[in-house]
Image (tube, grey):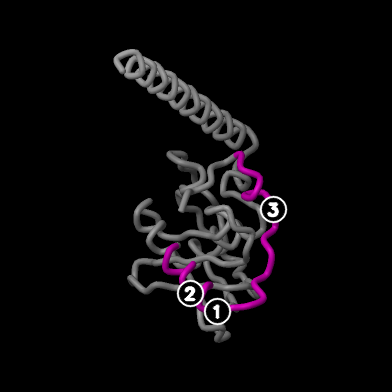
Amino acid sequence: MKLRILGDEVLRQRAEALVDINDETRQLVKAMFVTMDEAKGVGLAAPQIGLSQRLFVLRSDDDIDRVFINPHIIATSQETCSFEEGCLSVPQIYAEVERPEKITVQALDEHGKAFTLDAEGYLARIIQHEYDHLEGVLFIDRLDPELKEEAEKTIARREEKKAEREKEKARKKAKLEARKENYR
C-alpha cells in the first residue's frame, strides 16, 4: 500500500463511514498493520493509504494491535499536554502538539463489535492524531501558522526533488533502452 503525502487531496477530506464490516475489511486491516510496520509508524488511518474510510489502526507502548472503525471521541479532559508528533504523511517533520491528556472513544472493531475505550497519555495522543486524519486534519494544522507554512514548503520542496529524480531516472532508462535497440 502506498502512503499518501501532504498535498494529496484524500488527506484533506472528511472520511466516509464504513457501512459493511466484512472479510474484505479485515484483510484491509491486516494490510494496514503491515504498511504501518514497514513505515515504522505507531498508527495508520485509511486516508493515509488513499481510502476515504473512517478506519484507523494503531499499536501503542503496550504492543496491543487496536482497530477503530467509525470512531467517535465522546469526551476529552480539560487537562492537556504537549508532546512532539510526527506523521507518515508528513515525513521527517516533527513538532510539539498540545492535545487533551485523556479521552473516551467509541468505535467498532474489525468484527463489528462496539467498544468504548478510556485512554490517556501516549495512547490518547495516537488515537487523537489518527482520528484527525479521518476529519481531514493533519498534525501540522495544529501548529503555529508560521511553523505550518514552513512544514508545507519543506514537504513541497522534497516532493519536487523526488519528481525530478524520477524524471531523470526515466530519462536515463529511455536512453539505455535506445542504446540497446541500436545494438540489435
Q: Which residues are magenta?
A: 7-31
Residue for point 55% across, 86% down: 113
Asked whether disc 2 touches disc 1, contact meaning CB atoms under 8 Å apart, the reply is yes
Residue 113 seen anywhere in this rendered image of the structure:
yes
Distance CA(mark 3)–CA(mark 2): 23 Å
**Residue linked to disc 1:** 22
Residue 19 position in % (x across, y down): 67, 76
Q: Nearer the viewer, mark 3 or mark 1?
A: 1
Left or right: 178 as drawn, with respect to 108: left
Left or right: 122 as drawn, with respect to 79: left
Whether the magenta-drawn stretch holds residue 25 is answered as: yes
Q: Nearer the viewer, residue 137 or 83?
A: 137
Sequence order check: which comes first, mark 3 or mark 1?
3
Distance CA(mark 3)–CA(mark 1): 24 Å
Which quarter of the picture shows residue 9? Answer: top right
Name the residue type under label 2. Arg
Sequence order check: which comes first, mark 3 or mark 2?
3
Q: Which mark, by number, is residue 13?
A: 3
Q: Nearer the viewer, mark 3 or mark 2?
A: 2
